[in-house]
Image (cartoon, coloured by chain):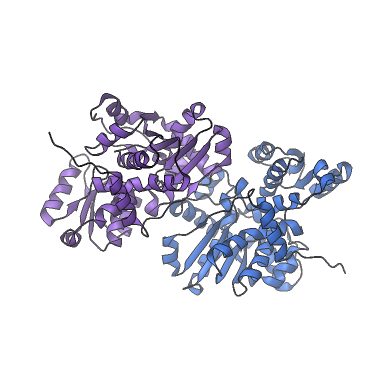
Chain colours: A blue, B purple
Amino acid sequence: MITLNLPTFDDVISASERIEGHAHRTPVMRSRTVDQAFGAELFFKCENLQRMGAFKFRGAFNALSKFDARQRRAGVVAFSSGNHAQAIALSASLLGMPATIVMPHDAPAIKVAATQGYGGTVVLYDRYKEDREQIGRELADKHGLTLIPPYDHPDVIAGQGTAAKELFEEEGPLDALFVSLGGGGLLAGSALSTRALAPACKLYGVEPEAGNDGQQSFRSGSIVHIETPKTIADGAQTQHLGSYTFPIIRRDVDDVLTVTDAQLVACMAFFAERMKLVVEPTGCLGFAAAREMKSQLRGQRIGVLLSGGNVDLQRFCALLA
Amino acid sequence: MITLNLPTFDDVISASERIEGHAHRTPVMRSRTVDQAFGAELFFKCENLQRMGAFKFRGAFNALSKFDARQRRAGVVAFSSGNHAQAIALSASLLGMPATIVMPHDAPAIKVAATQGYGGTVVLYDRYKEDREQIGRELADKHGLTLIPPYDHPDVIAGQGTAAKELFEEEGPLDALFVSLGGGGLLAGSALSTRALAPACKLYGVEPEAGNDGQQSFRSGSIVHIETPKTIADGAQTQHLGSYTFPIIRRDVDDVLTVTDAQLVACMAFFAERMKLVVEPTGCLGFAAAREMKSQLRGQRIGVLLSGGNVDLQRFCALLA
């Protein structure tokens, strides 16, 4: 049996020191309309307003900050078609190191361009014929690059935990916190902060219904693998939790909930119309679940992590049409 | 000759005391992308995140707060199909007084519903056959209501000035400030705060090119009336400046600039994609003009008032398509 050294809240504290002045301390937004509808107080932590548009910057910058001189010279490699790619490319650029991002050949041109815009070198692969993990590892071996995975890494988890840490520091202990769940980096990091700063707070991970591997894993006690799920929540299309994220989630989270794509669209429309915020589908997971549990939340103080805002406008409008 | 008692910065200070705890102190947002593109520091005062979604709440609440007991009992009347209607309805509701809003019979159902949702009584009129000002005045006379116009009123102007006051208080003196210009309530109020708190700051009003009555008035020295202009900036479709707003603008503003609808759409897309903010077309006027003047603004500290975010999603998406 392999024993992993799981990250702790001390690692979150160290991460928050490393990212200070680099990551935004994102605002916590309120809505009187929401509070009235819930008969409760809701606190929205706006990671859609984070640099590069998602919480992913926190974990990526934290992980890259810990590289030694040799690692920095050689640079980082990552595989992602989404927010992790941009987070790694931007963090590497800020820290003055090269970044190679392995992306599928049919990734949206806008995402390839954004990653290149942050200074990353993009390597395309055929997602139907090639294995991106293998390509990433080969690049790492051949050129001495350090591979930073999107969620299953202690430094990534510790970095993601800084968002919930800021929320509790500013608003005090909450009664419940709702967090988007894909591979579990944000949820596991949030769990470390929650158990340290608000031990009595109920902590919920929220997945798309079509991709409820996290819920199955949480309830069964071992990591369940699924096919890539069909959902508009592209940040939560992961097939399984990680070897670091799962034990933390299993230990510290109160439950894993699911919502439908239709519920996510309704939340996107609400955020745009009433709060004037663009939130990507994955970023709506937490609030969608909170709305479903509304009657149980009366009188409570509730945190919701809006994990990101990276949805291109054509897609945004197509979803809302 | 009639001499008007123009509002002063002391009135803005009193207004800020009246609205405190009722209006949001809206956040000032930054964007590294924008700062890099400009080679300057830009400060976006987010009145799209104000209550009811626009700066109009400040002036309406200030004006209604000054009503005496008799006025409060009888209530307020206003004519508007836009943000002023909602601002008056919400303010009246918060202050426990009745509000009657005169709206065109073909106003979007969503705006009628929003006004009613804030507790306002809506009176519809035929915009092709009837005169809304006359209807408003008749209602005022018959029922003893107090008419609060959308911009040409000292208390409304003083209230609108609190947004720029907050911006200067938080960010210190700026080199330039760009403000949306319709009837001039926001611009005149901003002028009072600018001349008191940052006397050397260049102050620009920005209009849609199709409705440049303000520019004509500013440059000619007397109020120019135009037909209702065709522009997507529905908050700036006013036909003329007011008797209170014009002399302040003429005295305190450095210039009035114009931008095209296409420039407004480009800014809306930018705010949504890069800053994750929904800003209505009228709210984009200031930034659109700043972009045109970019080369002259290098190295400066620049304020931009985002005046509102009330655009329904169908229209938002149609404009961006």
Tally of numbered tags:
0
Q: Position of residue B162 (x, y in %)?
A: 36, 48
Instruction: Please report the residue visible at 27 percent of the width from the left and 62 percent of the height from the top.
Output: B95
Q: Is residue A258 above or below residue B250?
A: below
- Is residue A178 visible from the viewing direction of this image? yes
Residue B174 at what x, y percent from top left?
Answer: 45, 38
Where is residue A173 shown, x and y percent of the image?
Answer: 56, 70
Whether residue A131 is visible to the viewer of this picture, yes or no, is no
For residue A89, side relative to residue B220 (left or right)? right
Q: Residue at x 30, y 52 (%)?
A: B14
Residue at the outermost top position:
B220
Q: Quadrant of residue A261?
A: bottom right
| Horizontal side of residue B123 vs A41, given as left or right | left
| Depth check, front residue: A78 or B22 | B22
The residue located at (41%, 39%) in the rendering is B281
Q: In front: B18, or A212?
A: B18
Describe residue A161's horizontal placement relative to residue B67 as left or right.
right
- Quadrant location of the N terminus of chain B? top left
Q: Position of residue B40 (x, y in %)?
A: 54, 34
Which is nearer the eye, A199 or A130?
Answer: A199
Farthest-out residue, left: B142
